[in-house]
Amino acid sequence: MLPWKRVLRPLAALLLTAAVALVPATAAQAADAPSRGWNNWSCKPSAAHPRPVVLVHGTFGNSVDNWLGLAPYLTKRDYCVFSLDYGQLPGVPFFHGLGPIDKSAEQLDAFVDRVLAATGAAEADLVGHSQGGMMPRYYLKFLGGAAEVNALVGIAPDNHGTTLSGLTRLLPYFPGAEDLLSTATPALADQIAGSAFLTKLNQGGDTVPGVRYTVIATKYDQVVTPYRSQYLDGPGVRNVLLQDLCPVDLSEHLAIGLFDRIAFHEVANALDPARARPSTCASAFS
């Protein structure tokens, strides 16, 4: 086996934990999403929650499986909730978020435009997991999204990339490895700490005026490492560590986005800060 393949294999294994944990979406699941209350294009925002919420899945995710926990949680609280697929690769079903991230941001831009047109709202709120918490920042910063978005909530977002516990730092030592990663799955290459994409995204500051930012992280994250690299710096930013809310919460990178109701409670607080209630271990039962 070539030496660089020994590096790519554990690298891919860690990144593919998302794919292993997610059950592929079926046509029946996708069709059932509106009956669960989200992706209902006739939904009109209420006076209490006047902005639609757009959910942005992570790498290897999709518009249904990523949100089987959070989407119903929010619709039960009277939000109009929508989710999209982005970053599709030809011939790869179900597992998305793999294409170039700048192009994925263009897909998000078009989807938000569609949501705003359907709901009649002036602005949307965005909630994303992993890449889905970071990618919208490109839309906000370079594609005019700041005029269309009130708040961005990132759940375990890789805002400054990931080292995958140091593995990505080995790639330059193996000729061809970085090129292979960039060609086969551009989004993975874009998410490596120090990539050209992330350098451009974070140059000149993490945030743009007029948008509220919340980051919800877990210290047990094994995909976006070190976990503090998820945090943002700038006006209108709130960085939250899950274990500060509930010290016994052991959620890692996937669990915090898929089914952690303490994280969900904090998402709801970020979407409606005027009615926020402290998130604690008891929030798991709310």
Image (spheres, rainbow, N blue to C red):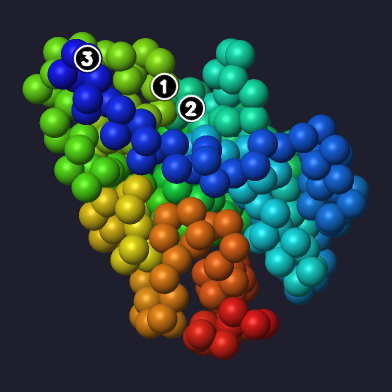
Residue 106 visible? The answer is no
Q: Is residue 169 above or below residue 270?
A: above
- Amino acid found under the numbered disc labelled 3: Met
Tell me what residue is drawn at x 30 percent, y 33 percent.
11
Q: Sequence order check: which comes first, mark 2 or mark 3?
A: 3
Against 282, residue 46 (above or below) is above
In the displayed orientation, state which residue is furthest to the front. Answer: 1
The image quadrant of residue 186 is top left
Observer-side mark, 2 or 3, equals 3
Q: Is residue 211 left or right of residue 192?
A: right
**Position of the N terminus by quadrant:** top left
Residue located 59% across and 72% down the image: 261
In this figure, which residue is indicated by the disc labeled 3?
1
Residue that carries the numbered disc 1 in the rendered image = 185
- Give me the C-alpha separation between circle 3 and circle 1: 21 Å
Residue 168 lies in quadrant: top left
Question: From the viewer's perspective, is the residue at label 3 or at label 1 nearer?
Answer: 3
Return the mark for residue 98. Answer: 2
